[in-house]
Image (cartoon, rainbow, N blue to C red):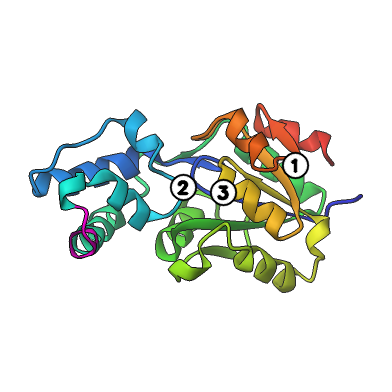
C-alpha cells in the first residue's frame, strides 16, 4: 500500500524534551518542598500529558485532586517559559522530514502534551513541516482515544489505512491501531521495544531514516 500521510507523536519521537519537562517539574516540586526526580525517573512519567506527569511526580501523601490541580497550574506557568530551552529534534529527524516532504507525504503531529505547548514547540523547531498540529485540549480525548488521529485523517482527506502513525510509547501504538492506522514504534524515545510490540507496533525503527523502508 502507498502511504500518503504520516502522523508523529512529539515527545520522545520528534524531539527530546525530557530535560525541559523534568527541569520545569522539579522547579515546581522545589517550590513546594517536595522531593525532586532525576531525568531517568521523569522519563517513565512522560507520555500521558502534563497533568499525568504532575500526578506521578508528587509524593503519594500529597496526591489529592486539589494538590494535583494546583501544581498542574504551576507547571503550566513554569513550562511555558522553559519548553524550548533544551528541547531539540533527535538526530536524523530533519533529514527524514525533508525526505518525506520530497515524496509528497503529508505530515501532522498528534500529542498528549497540552495543545499550547505542542504548537509552540512545533512552530519553533519545525516551521512549515506539519499541518495540522494537535495537542491535548480535553482530557477525555487523550490518546489512546483515536479521535485526534481520525480528525487529522478527515482534515487531510486521506483514509486512515493510508496513514502511518509514529510514536515511542505503547499508548501511541494503541492509538494507531484504534484508528486503523499503520503503527510504527521508535526506539530512541522513552519506552522499550517490548512495550511497543506488546501494544501493537507493526514495525519498529532503530533510527529515523529506517521509516523510508516502509515507503
For label 3, the residue is: 171
Image vertical order of residue 195 relative to residue 1, above or below: above
Q: Which residue is rendered at x = 78% and y = 53% of the image? A: 105
> Mark 2 and mark 1: span between their CA atoms?
27 Å
Name which of mark 3 and mark 2 comes first in the sequence. Answer: 2
Note whether residue 76 is visible. yes
> Mark 3 and mark 2: span between their CA atoms?
8 Å
Instruction: Decide: few, some or many residues near mark 3? Use Cα within 10 Å; few <14, some 14-19, many ≥20.
Output: many
> Mark 1 and mark 3: span between their CA atoms?
27 Å
Secondary element at tag 1: helix
Name which of mark 2 and mark 1 comes first in the sequence. Answer: 2
Name which of mark 1 and mark 3 comes first in the sequence. Answer: 1
Quarter of the picture containing the C terminus is top right
**Residue 168: in magenta span:** no
Q: Nearer the viewer, residue 183 or 78?
A: 183
Image vertical order of residue 3 relative to residue 87, above or below: below
Please tell me whether mark 1 or mark 3 is closer to you in this view.
3
- Looking at the image, the residue that sits furthest to the front is 61
Q: Which residues are magenta?
A: 63-68
Q: Are marks 3 and 2 in contact (CB under 8 Å)?
A: yes
- The rendered magenta stretch, by its main secondary structure, is classed as helix
Q: Which residue is rendered at x = 75% and y = 55% of the image? A: 181
For label 1, the residue is: 99
Q: Position of residue 9 (x, y in %)?
A: 57, 50
Image vertical order of residue 98 relative to residue 116, above or below: above
Q: Position of residue 28 (x, y in %)?
A: 18, 49
- The numbered dot on residue 47 is 2
Amino acid at each position: 500500500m502507498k502511504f500518503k500521510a504520516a502522523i508523529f507523536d512529539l515527545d520522545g519521537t520528534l524531539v527530546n524534551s525530557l530535560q525541559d519537562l523534568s527541569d520545569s517539574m522539579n522547579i515546581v516540586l522545589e517550590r513546594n518542598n517536595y522531593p525532586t526526580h532525576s531525568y531517568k525517573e521523569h522519563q517513565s512519567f512522560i507520555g500521558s500529558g502534563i497533568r499525568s506527569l504532575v500526578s506521578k511526580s508528587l509524593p503519594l501523601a500529597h496526591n489529592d485532586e486539589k494538590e494535583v490541580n494546583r501544581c498542574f497550574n504551576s507547571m503550566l506557568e513554569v513550562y511555558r517559559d522553559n519548553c524550548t530551552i533544551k528541547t531539540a529534534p533527535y538526530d536524523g529527524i530533519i533529514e527524514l522530514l525533508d525526505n518525506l516532504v520530497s515524496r509528497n507525504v503529508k505530515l501532522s503531529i498528534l500529542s498528549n502534551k497540552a495543545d499550547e505547548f505542542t504548537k509552540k514547540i512545533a512552530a519553533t523547531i519545525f516551521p512549515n513541516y506539519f499541518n495540522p498540529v494537535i495537542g491535548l485540549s480535553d482530557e477525555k480525548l487523550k490518546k489512546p482515544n483515536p479521535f485526534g488521529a481520525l480528525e487529522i485523517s478527515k482534515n487531510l482527506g486521506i483514509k486512515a489505512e493510508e496513514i502511518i502513525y509514529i510514536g515511542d510509547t505503547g499508548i501511541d501504538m494503541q492509538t494507531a491501531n484504534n484508528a486503523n492506522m499503520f503503527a510504527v514504534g521508535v526506539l530512541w524515545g522513552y519506552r522499550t521495544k517490548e512495550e511497543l510490540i506488546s501494544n501493537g507496533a507493526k514495525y519498529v525503527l532503530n533510527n529515523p531514516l529506517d521509516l523510508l523502508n516502509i515507503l
